[in-house]
Amino acid sequence: MKSLAILTSVFCVPVLCPGLLTSSLAADWPMWGGRPDRNMISGIKGLPSAWEINTKKNIRWMAALGSQTYGNPVVAGGLVLVGTNNEAPRDPKQMGDRGVLMAFRESDGEFLWQSTHEKLATGRVNDWPFQGVCSSPLVENEVVYYVSNRGEVLALDRQGFRDKENDGPFKEERLTSERDADILWKFDMIEEVGAFPHNMSNSSPVSWGELIFVSTSNGQDESHVNVPSPKAPAIIALDKRTGKLVWEDNPVGERVLHGQWSSAAAGVIGGVAQVVIGQGDGWVRSYEAASGKRLWEFDLNPKDSVWPKTRNEVISTPVIYQDRVYIANGQDPEHGEGVGHLYAIDATKRGDITKTGQVWHYDKIRRSISTGAIADGLLYYADFSGFLHCLDVATGKPYWVHDMLAAVWGSPLVADGKVYLGDEDGDVVVLQHGKTKKVLAENNLGSSVYSTPVPANGALFIANRNQLYALAEAEK
Ligand SMILES: [Ca+2]
Ligand SMILES: [Ca+2]
């Protein structure tokens, strides 16, 4: 990268620059959800409905990942970045169980560089074996932000050491070849704010102005009773140039039901820049982005619900759409299936808005860890039991439900008049976008698809457990 001055250049957010959305036919997908509102939609046309692994029909390239991949790909500046583990090691000097962020060239899938992280010595309670990097990076102005399996927020130079320069205040990299990561700064949430991540730190950063926002994943210990670090914040805001802590908030304390694995969304709601996130007590909360002032909070569980049978945590990422927030609750996949709740929330209200802010409540959904997609008055939302729900976004009334016949970890994507959704059986179902259910195709990717299909620059990028595919219509 040329200099850190580039970090201070004006950042154009889509809500302020709507042209970015309408001209997105050839657009990157530089963060989880594509944009800060996290709405899983894209204006890209010409995406394939069908592909075949065996004949390589509509498959541009495939790259090998580790054995378990829970990170979702992002695409920016000619790179595809994805979090995985180290079971397909790229460097004999960096062996053993590690979290890995890999960068591939977008055009042909060539491996470019990686950032690896040894597992925490405390073991599975904080850093589950072989789960790798689970955060989806945010790429902005040549910088890659993500959260490692060690509970660190990192900023990397997108060009790594391929630019022959060691950039940023951080110069202590031990490995500085073209295939290694160039760290600009890092913020250790365990050391700096006392976070005790339960099983895994996973947050996907979002930015607003000069700040980036992440969940600390602070949670219970292995007893599933004690919260060892009740004073640690649930959410932090860091200065994106320096990695310095700007604000933090801890509204949850001892009331963490389990862990904290929701990621934040950001956007202007009712004229105020808000950061919205699900937290460990099963509530969703919103903050004034610049100051961290708490604006509103909403309980995603009925008051008579009981953990863990009927009361849920919240793992989904909220979606911001036209002054409302859409989010479902659910539980760690290890807890299996159960009842869930999906809400539309009026995010212009203030205080405890559990009653006053509820626009509608949909209780026909099961536990969900997915994020929604809203287009043309329709909300698509998947649940862990494998049902994809198509609802009227204004009223919450269902138009149709599709049974995937397998667990769903990822989220639906709406693009090119189609809805794409992957499942644990490795199937990616393609449905027609609209009020009437129509399955267009079902394509198997060979192993479980825990990720969400990512559209960018005319192609679709999908990770299964151990491979990253770039799918595109073959040249006619
Ligand atoms: Ca560099
Ligand atoms: Ca550096």
Image: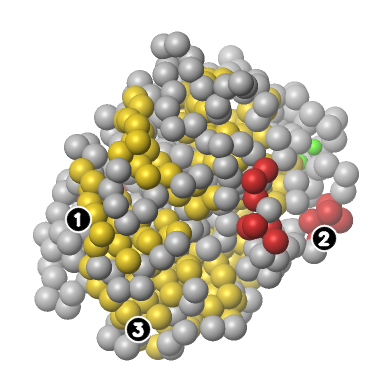
Q: Which residue is mark 3?
A: 357
Q: Work out whether residue 196 can be spotted.
A: no
Query: Upstream in the sequence, badge 3 or badge 2?
Result: 2
Task: Please name the amino acid that badge 1 sits on.
Answer: Arg
- Mark 2 and ligand 1: say if the CB distance to the nearest ligand atom is below 8 Å: no
Residue at image location 34% in from the left, 32% down from the top: 441
Crowding around mark 1 (Cα neighbors within 10 Å: few <14, some 14 to 19, many 20+) is many
Crowding around mark 2 (Cα neighbors within 10 Å: few <14, some 14 to 19, many 20+) is few
Q: Work out whether residue 162 can be spotted.
A: yes
Give percent across and percent down for residue 144: 66, 45
CA gap, disc 2 to disc 1? Answer: 44 Å
Q: Which residue is mark 2?
A: 9
Residue in the foreground of this view, choosing between 179 and 255:
179
Crowding around mark 3 (Cα neighbors within 10 Å: few <14, some 14 to 19, many 20+) is many
In the rendered image, the quadrant that contains the N terminus is: top right
Residue in the foreground of this view, choosing between 442 and 128:
442
Q: Is residue 346 left or right of residue 182?
A: left
* Element type where label 3 sits in the image: loop
Give percent across and percent down for residue 249: 48, 73
Observer-side mark, 2 or 1, equals 1
Task: Please name the amino acid that badge 3 sits on.
Answer: Gly
CA gap, disc 3 to disc 1? Answer: 22 Å
Give percent across and percent down for residue 337: 16, 49
Residue in the foreground of this view, choosing between 382 and 204:
382
* Element type where label 2 sits in the image: loop
Q: Report which quarter residue 363 is drawn in.
A: bottom left
Numbered mark located on residue 366 in the image: 1
Q: Report which quarter residue 429 is drawn in.
A: top left
Residue at image location 46% in from the left, 47% down from the top: 417
